[in-house]
Amino acid sequence: MSSKRKLHKWSIDFSGHGRSKSDRQVQVQDIRAPVGYTESTGTIVEQSGKEADQKLIDKRSWDIALGPLKQIPMNFFIMWMAGNSISIFPIMMVGMMFFKPIQAFISVQNTFVMIEGSQAIIQKFIYIFGNFVCLMLAMYKCQTMGLLPTHASDWLAFMDPQKRMEWSGGGLYY
């Protein structure tokens, strides 16, 4: 194999053959700075410990406050997957959707015991509002499944059940 190989323009010669000794020794001044690097004069900006702790507490408390609102899309998906039939799986899903917000209402003070600051009341309100929305979502699911007593015939034995104005099934109207 010959020592003089033809190098393509996209190849790199790592062996060092054919270069002089001065080419191999790269001076520090010749190296360009990486993209985005700015040379500073040694000034380091540090946050005080209290500011960093307060920012961390605020971030954590907002994460807790927005938690129930972040669960709403997941609850919609679970409601859709459970369907409207009365069976064990949809009943368990609706029960879970009921009891989680109720437990959250009971333990609001325990949840926000460590949170202090000017935004604590707003965060508690958002937390309670998110749990209220989740509870209303569970109520809606119960209503669509027919589990809520919404007509007089559901309460009184002598009332006739509500008559359907139209029935459909199998692509035919009756």
Image (cartoon, grey):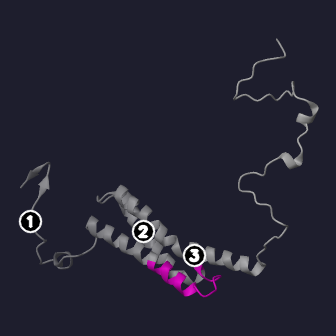
Name the side, left or right, on which 158 lies relative to 100.
left
- Badge 1: residue crowd in 10 Å (few <14, some 14–19, many ≥20): few
Magenta highlight range: 111-129
The image quadrant that residue 62 belongs to is bottom right
Which of pointers 3 and 1 indicates the residue nearer the eye?
A: 3
- Compute the Cα span from label 3 to label 1: 49 Å
The image quarter containing residue 57 is bottom right
Q: Residues within 10 Å of mark 3 (few under 14, many from 20)?
A: some
Q: Is residue 60 left or right of residue 168?
A: right
Mark 1: amino acid: Met
- Asked where in the image residue 3 lies, by quadrant, the reply is top right
For marks 3 and 2, the one nearer the N-term is 3
> Going by the picture, which residue comes out furthest to the right?
21
Residue 62: mark: 3
Label pair 1/2, CB-CB below 8 angstroms: no
Most extreme residue toward the left, as rendered?
174
Q: Secondary structure at mark 1?
A: loop
The residue that disc 1 covers is: 165
